[in-house]
Image: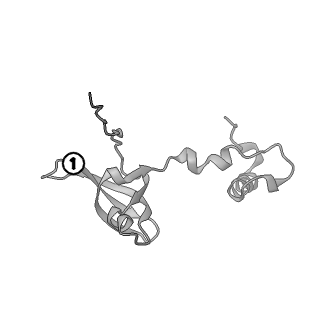
Amino acid sequence: MAQQIQPAVRPQTRYLKGDLVLFRDVERFWLGLPGHTFVGRVERAWRHIETRKVLYDLTELSGNRARAGIDPDYMRPLPATDAMHDIDTAPLSEPDTGAMTPAAVAWLRQHLAQDSSTLPVRR
């Protein structure tokens, strides 16, 4: 008996206005053209009448350019935890700031300049 191969099913992610996403212009990608992957901000979601699929309008952040009708199959969320990981895991007990990433050092200096009593509690 022949074994049937089941296609991988990715759970559908719903994006909200203001979410940051990574998206890929699939045509440029498959043609091998440069500039096919961008960071964008979700502006709105809407349902396509013919396909009944939810599509998204984005703002491409690198050039503040509007991109309409983006298929969510070619979008991935950019979670805040990933963007803030270097700051959240900065070795604050180390006397050498060289052990920290530049983003962590900048964040720490900004907060120390404001008021050292307002540093957040590490979770």
Q: How far across and down, in percent of the image, does residue 74 sit?
A: 36, 54
Q: Can you tell which quarter of the image residue 27 is in? A: bottom left
Q: How far across and down, in percent of the image, does residue 43 sit?
A: 34, 57
Of residue 102 and residue 50, the one placed in the foreground of this image is 50
Which residue is at 41% across, 66% downward? Answer: 36
Residue sitting at the far left: 50
Q: Is residue 78 left or right of residue 85?
A: left
Q: Can you tell which quarter of the image residue 12 is in? A: top left
Q: How is the image coloured?
A: one colour
Q: Dividing the image into 4 quarters, which one contains the C terminus?
A: top right
Residue sitting at the far top: 1
Mark 1 sits on what residue? 53
Q: How far across and down, in percent of the image, does residue 77 sit?
A: 44, 48
Say if residue 82 shows up in the picture: yes
SS at circle 1: loop
The correct choice, above or below, for 92 with respect to 102 in the image is above
Q: Is residue 102 left or right of residue 67?
A: right
Which amino acid is tagged 1?
A: Lys
Of residue 2 and residue 32, the one placed in the foreground of this image is 2
Q: How far across and down, in percent of the image, does residue 71 sit?
A: 29, 54
Of residue 48 and residue 106, the one placed in the foreground of this image is 48
User: Mark 1, residues whose alpha carbon is within 10 Å: few (<14), some, or many (≥20)?
Assistant: few
Which residue is at 74% across, 50% downward? Answer: 115
Say if residue 19 shows up in the picture: no
Q: Dividing the image into 4 quarters, which one contains the N terminus?
A: top left
